[in-house]
């Protein structure tokens, strides 16, 4: 496949989504064992230990002030985005949490117009609406079954907060990927989280057991792989083209939720997923050039 092939950023984005969906499953297991904050902090510490040598081996240099500010801005957003998400998946089924988080690509699509000046194609608008409709089908089916106690309410509030932060993160990574390489982005992404979450560690830390450490190491590896893949892809394609591929994460969440936590698929889930797949197909279609 040629380096300038327009399908390559799409394939890399799909890989990133799959990697981070599997990471979510490992993190849910770890967060249930030691709490969301401990799990998030240890994942960031392990990911930094992986990403930092990669960056330094490529001749990593301290970024200029403007680039550093962008790194810090996205890393702070990503830190709280991840923490609220990991808390949410301890209260909600994995697939349901992913489905609700799909409002993020919809919001990001229009933030890309406002903040990046991207012209939104008709296909991208249709895709975003289709993908959102698919998530509503899934959520509607879940709402009919759910017991809305305090824990569920906290989980829903947390996942909605995470989704809003995730939408903003999409825009920041598009800017970030224009001025820094994937290994540098991954290093700052994890390193800043270590510092921020570390402020609460003395009060909330719980020591993991052996199986939880395995989950955390796997999550850290997948975090670095996903972060670098996203950075590479967003440096080569517009946000509106790549954002709808986030919807494929539900397919992975459904699979991993079933494998890891015995979470069943329902009819609304299957129907909503089919709509989401259709939205991805619509988004990735390019208009045919006019005949000369």
Image (cartoon, rainbow, N blue to C red):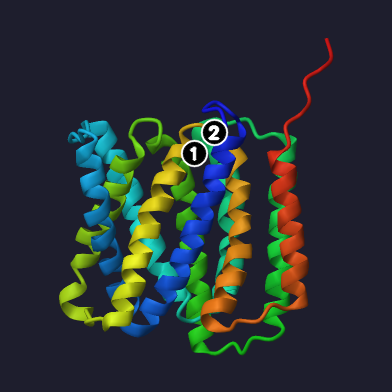
- Badge 1 density bin: few <14, some 14–19, many ≥20, Cα 10 Å: many
Residue 194 higher or lower than 242, as above or below = below
61 to the left or right of 168: left
Residue 113 at x, y = what percent?
Answer: 57, 36
User: Viewer-proximal residue, 121 or 260?
Assistant: 260
Q: Label 1 near label 2: C-beta < 8 Å? A: yes
**Residue 279's mark?**
none
> Which residue is farthest left?
202
Dot 1: element = helix
- Badge 2 density bin: few <14, some 14–19, many ≥20, Cα 10 Å: some
Residue 153 at x, y = what percent?
Answer: 52, 81
Distance between the alpha carbons at the discs numbered 2 and 1: 6 Å
Residue 271 at x, y = what percent?
Answer: 78, 67
Mark 1 lies on residue? 233
Residue at image coords 35%, 30%: 179
Residue 285 at x, y = what percent?
Answer: 73, 37
> Which residue is farthest right?
291
User: Viewer-proximal residue, 87 or 13?
Assistant: 13
> Which residue is farthest top?
292
> Which residue is farthest front?
1
274 to the left or right of 75: right
Q: Quadrant of the C terminus?
A: top right
Residue at image coords 36%, 66%: 218
Q: Quadrant of the N terminus?
A: top right
Residue 31 higher or lower than 219, as above or below = below
Residue at image coords 48%, 65%: 22
Residue 64 higher or lower than 167, as above or below = above
Mark 2 lies on residue? 237
Residue at image coords 68%, 64%: 135
Dot 2: element = loop
């Amino acid at each position: 496949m040629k380096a300038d092939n327009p399908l390559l950023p799409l394939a890399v984005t799909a890989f990133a989504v799959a990697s981070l969906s599997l990471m979510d499953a490992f993190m849910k297991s770890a967060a249930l064992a030691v709490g969301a904050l401990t799990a998030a902090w240890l994942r960031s510490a392990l990911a930094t230990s992986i990403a930092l040598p990669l960056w330094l081996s490529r001749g990593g240099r301290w970024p200029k002030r403007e680039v550093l500010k962008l790194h810090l801005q996205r890393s702070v957003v990503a830190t709280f985005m991840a923490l609220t998400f990991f808390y949410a998946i301890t209260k909600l089924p994995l697939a349901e949490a992913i489905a609700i988080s799909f409002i993020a690509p919809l919001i990001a699509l229009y933030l890309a117009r406002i903040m990046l000046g991207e012209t939104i194609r008709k296909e991208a608008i249709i895709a975003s609406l289709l993908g959102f409709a698919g998530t509503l089908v899934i959520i509607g089916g879940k709402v009919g079954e759910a017991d809305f106690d305090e824990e569920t309410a906290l989980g829903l509030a947390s996942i909605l907060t995470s989704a809003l932060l995730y939408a903003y993160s999409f825009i920041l990574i598009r800017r970030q990927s224009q001025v820094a390489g994937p290994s540098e982005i991954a290093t700052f992404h994890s390193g800043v989280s270590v510092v921020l979450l570390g402020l609460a560690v003395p009060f909330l830390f719980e020591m993991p057991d052996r199986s939880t450490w395995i989950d955390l190491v796997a999550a850290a590896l997948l975090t670095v792989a996903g972060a670098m893949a996203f950075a590479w892809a967003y440096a080569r394609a517009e946000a509106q083209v790549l954002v709808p591929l986030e919807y494929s994460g539900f397919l992975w969440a459904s699979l991993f939720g079933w494998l890891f936590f015995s979470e069943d698929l329902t009819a609304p889930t299957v129907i909503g997923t089919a709509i989401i797949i259709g939205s991805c197909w619509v988004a990735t279609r390019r208009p045919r050039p006019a005949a000369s």
